[in-house]
Amino acid sequence: MKEQPITPPLPEDISVVGGGTMGTALAHLLAGKGIRVRLWVYEPELVDAINAQRENTLFLPGLPLHPGIVATSDLGTTIRGAPYVLSVTPAQHLRRIWTEARSHLADDAAVICASKGIEVKTGMLMSQVFDAVLGPSASQRLAFLSGPSFAREILDGMPTAVVVASENLALAEAVQRIVSTATFRAYTTDDVIGVELGGALKNVIAIAVGAAEGLGLGINSRAALITRGLAEITRLSIACGGTPLTQSGLSGMGDLVLTCTGHLSRNLQVGIRLGRGEILSDILSGTRMVAEGVATAGPALELARSVGIEMPITETVVHLLDGSLSPEDAVTRLMGRRLRSEKED
């Protein structure tokens, strides 16, 4: 008789750092598996709303949350003693939050990062920021969760598939088992940089797709931007050491398609409003939500230039965001580029 592998029990406790839409949705998912979840939220008013009303009234109003979630605004209380810490903070705040949080992190605790972006000040990916804050040896206890996943649909129990990336495949498999449910399926990979770049850059491409939609340019343009956007992301990923097939998977094409077609996408909405002639500062000031592509576009272009990769859509988005190109001129610029083979870099 073939011996069956022993499946380790799920952890009794998990901490989640970040009470926005995705952090709250993942906390709800984990609590539904019988795991006690400590959720750190930045906004003090959310602590009572989540603990007493079982609702994230700021970011996910009207959606009931699992009673197994305990919210707090004390970072140390959230993290201390947790075997796994799920980090779901805006990319530009990750360094600051984890500089404070690291003293509370157990030496053997694993960190699962679901943030997507590139740090503006340094051009670092989230894995590089963690290396800087926690030390380079921390890579063996870091995993990255990415893929096409709107928070509201996770909360509603809609079927969702994601990928967990880690240099430590045993950790990736442990996280896969922890987060997977009947409606939330996780795959694994060791291509951390490919997964990170796919998750970060799809937001930039979504702004371009949104601008085309705002201009009323039809579905052909959307398909073209998604396809050529995927080509740019893949080129950069390979140049940075990523595996080519990663961008054909959930964290690449999957997340790109969702973010460029689903109207729950904040980055798509920013692009649509830019295409309709609104001013970026007005768009951003009117929401508490973070559109990561706005901050990511510039450092993504700098990264591409540093490795000799051409990214025309990303470059156009940078100029669209800084106001040096109008949406109409952005389209003219892309369509007027030199004709070339589709195989050409």
Image: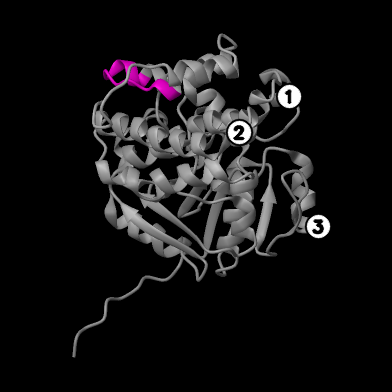
The residue carrying mark 3 is: 53
User: Which is closer to the viewer, label 1 or label 2?
Assistant: 2
Dot 2, crowdedness within 10 Å: few (<14), some or many (≥20)? many
Q: Which mark is residue 98?
A: none
Q: Position of residue 247 (x, y in %)?
A: 34, 43
Q: Which residue is mark 2?
A: 213
Name the mark nearer the viewer: 2 or 3. 2
Is residue 10 visible to us here? yes
Instruction: Say whether residue 339 is left or right of residue 38.
Output: left
- Give whichever of 249, 111 is nearer the camera: 249
Of residues 73 and 279, the one nearer the viewer is 279
Q: Which sits in the foreground, 54 or 107?
A: 54
Q: Is residue 112 above or below residue 129?
A: below
| Residue 299 locus on image (x, y percent) | 44, 20
Residue range highlighted in magenta: 303-313
Farthest residue in the bottom direction? Answer: 1
Tag count: 3
**Please, is residue 21 above or below residue 14 in the view?**
above
Q: Quadrant of the N terminus?
A: bottom left
Tell me the residue that label 1 is attached to. Answer: 285
Q: Amino acid at mark 1?
A: Ser
Q: Quadrant of the C terminus?
A: top left
Residue 336 percent coordinates (x, y): 42, 16
Mark 1 residue element? helix
Ranked by sequence position, the earlier of labels 1 and 2 is 2
Of helix, strand and loop, which one carries label 2?
helix
Residue 111 in view in this figure: no
Disc 1 to disc 2, C-alpha distance: 22 Å
